[in-house]
Amino acid sequence: MNIFVIGRMIGLWLIKINKMKKIVLFTLLVISTFANAQRHEEEKKYDVRGSGESPNVNKYRGPYNDSAFKIPFNTYEQKNYPKAYEEYTTYLKKYPTDFLALYNRALCSYNLKDYKTAIRDFTECIFLKKKDVNTYYMRGLSNFNLKEYKLAEKDFDTTLTYNKNFHKAYCYKGACLNEDKKYSEGLKLLDIAASITSTFEPTFFYRNVSRYYTGDYEGGLSDCEKAIALQKSYLTTFWKGSHLIELKRHKEAAIIFDTVIAHEPKNAKAYFNRSLCHYDNGDYKTGLKDVTSAIELSPSSPSYYYQRGLCNFFLGNYETTVTDCNSALTLGYKDARAYCFRGASHYYLSKDDLAYEDLNKAIELKPSYESSYYYRAKLNFANAKYDAGIADCDQALKLIKTVDSYRIKGNCLTELKKYDEAIQNYNLGLEIKKDSYLTTLDRGITYYYQEKDDLARKDFDKAISLNKTQGEPYYFRGKLKKIANDNAGACADLKQAQTLGFKKASDELVKLGCK
């Protein structure tokens, strides 16, 4: 046979095959388009968090063999995902290009939380049908659950390319941006998702996270309430409590965390946050108990040790505070506050060199933290470094005006015999907190040194009315009464000062000859 004739026959044969391919591809395209129109929207099913999505299997009965397709489909409907996966695998050996069977098998893996296998099947689906919106979306969710946020974001972008109103894609892309700490960008996408529909719980959950980290606690609280109304979740309840803490609504927040802990008794973060609530309410003892529970559940969390150190500090347990701050710093806690309160504890333990070292370090790490200057000012005052103490108080007052910083500055000025300036600072402090026992007492002592006895007497009277358990104001009032020749009154006050443990009162009693 002539080689040209053979070539012609082969050419005609290839043309026929090509035509057949086009017919088959066209048929599959029509069927797939119809199948896509039949696909049911995914259901919501919530786990600890993840994406929370559990889509329905596609109910279209396949273009290849209806009866064979029904077998795995019915098994899937019974939520027997392992068996359904096996049955779809058997089916696909006969019909390997059945897009719908492959898609549904991917959903089996997804529901079994075998996201890597799901991604493999969703990717095969994309080879068969490159513009199927739901496949990109589901592959994105699978990547999201594997914490592959960049890959997930890319899939959600593709989803939105083909369907600009796919609100779930906006939602989860926003969640991806949250994970990348791009909270403002995430918030914009979550706003779009919420504008499309107000019935998808994850949108409000993830938007509450965006709002928390952008400082919109009222908005975040509102989102939590919307999410809970759509689907109760203790994780969302936890976030609600977190917003309440930031809004200084500590009593409400504590009740929220009571609920979370009752449901999740091993939730270390809930104990920690409830400790914050008690701490901010001044209940350091209960706060200490809660944060200790948090440490028992999560012993490698440095912030928990710092929080326990704070509770111990304000309970006067300074040695324990040092131990807790040591643990926090050893575990990598890099906040200047740990150095500050360890340094303040060293001050109260009369370990001045260690106190200076820690407070200097705290100021170096965070020059904007007021408490470090305040405690260093107290340390300087105790070491008769009055000018340095005044400088530290001035720096503290530039950051936050507090009655305590005005008082310590006043004390330094009093020691330098700058009484009028001292009085001015005490007055400024009392404008902030008019019932400050220590500031009232110290102003009275300064008036006493100025020999302004009437003003001093008023301050000592007020100090006693504010705190009857301290001997010092009785001591100074007794001395004023002695000056006024009220020996009986002086003896009574000095005896009371002695009873309350103010040691200087004993010498005055002897001098006055009190019985």
Image (spheres, rainbow, N blue to C red):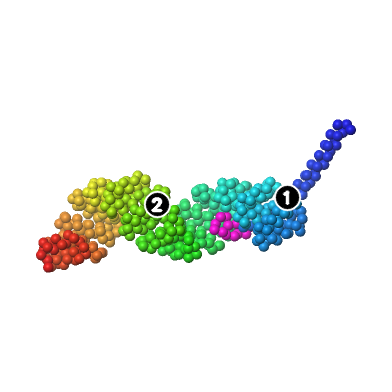
168 sits left or right of 449 in the view: right
24 sits left or right of 452 in the view: right
The secondary structure that dominates the magenta segment is loop
Q: Secondary structure at mark 1?
A: loop
| Residue found farthest to the right | 1
Q: Position of residue 165 (x, y in %)?
A: 61, 52
Is disc 1 surrounded by few (<14), some (14 to 19) or many (20+) residues within 10 Å? Answer: few
Which quadrant would residue 87 be assigned to in this image? bottom right
Q: Secondary structure at mark 2?
A: helix
Q: Residue at x 18, y 60 (%)?
A: 503
Specify the amino acid type for callout 2.
Answer: Ala
**Quick one: quadrant of the C terminus?**
bottom left
Vertical comparison of 480 with 214: above or below: below
Q: Which residue is mark 2?
A: 328
Q: Which residue is mark 1?
A: 96
Q: Nearer the viewer, residue 11 or 184?
A: 11
CA gap between label 2 and label 1 equals 57 Å
Q: Is residue 50 magenta?
A: yes
Q: Is residue 373 magenta?
A: no
Residue 284's disc number: none
Q: Residue at x 33, y 52 (%)?
A: 342
Q: Nearer the viewer, residue 326 or 49?
A: 326
Q: Nearer the viewer, residue 488 or 275?
A: 275
Q: Position of residue 83 (x, y in %)?
A: 68, 58
Which quadrant would residue 284 be assigned to in this image? bottom left
Specify the segment rendered in magenta.
40-53
Q: Is residue 10 visible?
A: yes
Q: Mark 1 or mark 2, which is nearer the start of the sequence? A: 1
Q: Nearer the viewer, residue 225 or 507?
A: 507
